[in-house]
Amino acid sequence: MAASGDDLEDEEYEALAYQQRLKAALHYTVGRICEKAGEESGLQYSRRFIAALTETTFKQCESFATDLELFAKHGKRSQINSDDVQLLARKSSTLATHMEGMSKELAEAHEANKAYKKTRKVKKTKPAQECNEALEIEDNQ
């Protein structure tokens, strides 16, 4: 069934409204960062500069999103993972090093969480086994 013209217009309108909300949130955040940096350095940033920086940041984020999707697709995956993000950050050595460290920390935390869950599972099943053994002992007497 083909979508009607009104449905397409509604979808386009929703997509545009969503993009504008994203840009507004990004503009606010960039403005706050510039304000904070200006206080520290004694500089004042114009509204035009903040708007241009916001637009540049938005375009860069779009480019990053496209690259991440393509990296995942190249890896024959439907989800983006930390390897894709590290691949994206490869051109900036300091960022790549930071991302690698964060990835290792997350992997260690994930392993620790898995070990914790495993010990909890063993503790939960152990009393049940002890109860069954106690019942068997009573039955034998």
Image (tube, rainbow, N blue to C red):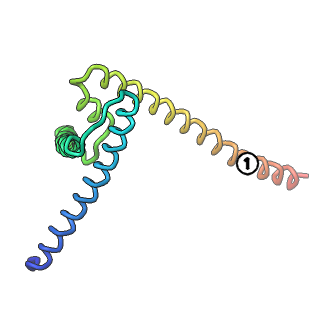
Q: Position of residue 31 (x, y in %)?
A: 32, 44
Q: Residue furthest right?
A: 141
Q: Is residue 123 above or below residue 98?
A: below
Q: Could you tell me which residue is drawn at 19 percent across and 44 percent down?
A: 48
- Does 34 appear above or below 128? above
How far from the left and from the top, in percent, is residue 131?
79, 51
Residue at (31, 25) in percent of width and height = 95
In this view of the protein, which residue sits in the foreground, 135 or 24?
A: 24
Q: Residues within 10 Å of mark 1 (few under 14, many from 20)?
A: few
Percent of width and height locating residue 139: 86, 55
Q: Residue at x 36, y 33 (%)?
A: 37
Toward which corner of the image does residue 53 lie, by quadrant?
top left
Does residue 76 appear anywhere in the picture? no
Task: Tell me which amino acid carries mark 1.
Answer: Gln
* Position of 59 relative to 6 (above/below): above
On-image quarter of the N terminus: bottom left
**Left or right of 41 in this view: 11:** left
Does 104 sit above or below residue 70?
Answer: above
Q: Which residue is mark 1?
A: 129
Most foreground residue, 21 or 122: 21
Along the viewing direction, whichever of 108 and 86 lies nearer the viewer: 86
Location of residue 12 by image quarter: bottom left
Residue 64 quadrant: top left
Total numbered badges shown on the rendered structure:
1
Does residue 15 appear anywhere in the picture? yes
Label 1 sits on a secondary structure element that is: helix
Viewed as shown, does residue 78 lie left or right of 36?
Answer: left
Tell me what residue is drawn at x 69 percent, y 48 percent.
124
Task: Tell me: 32 left or right of 27.
Answer: right
Image location (x, y in percent) of residue 84:
26, 35
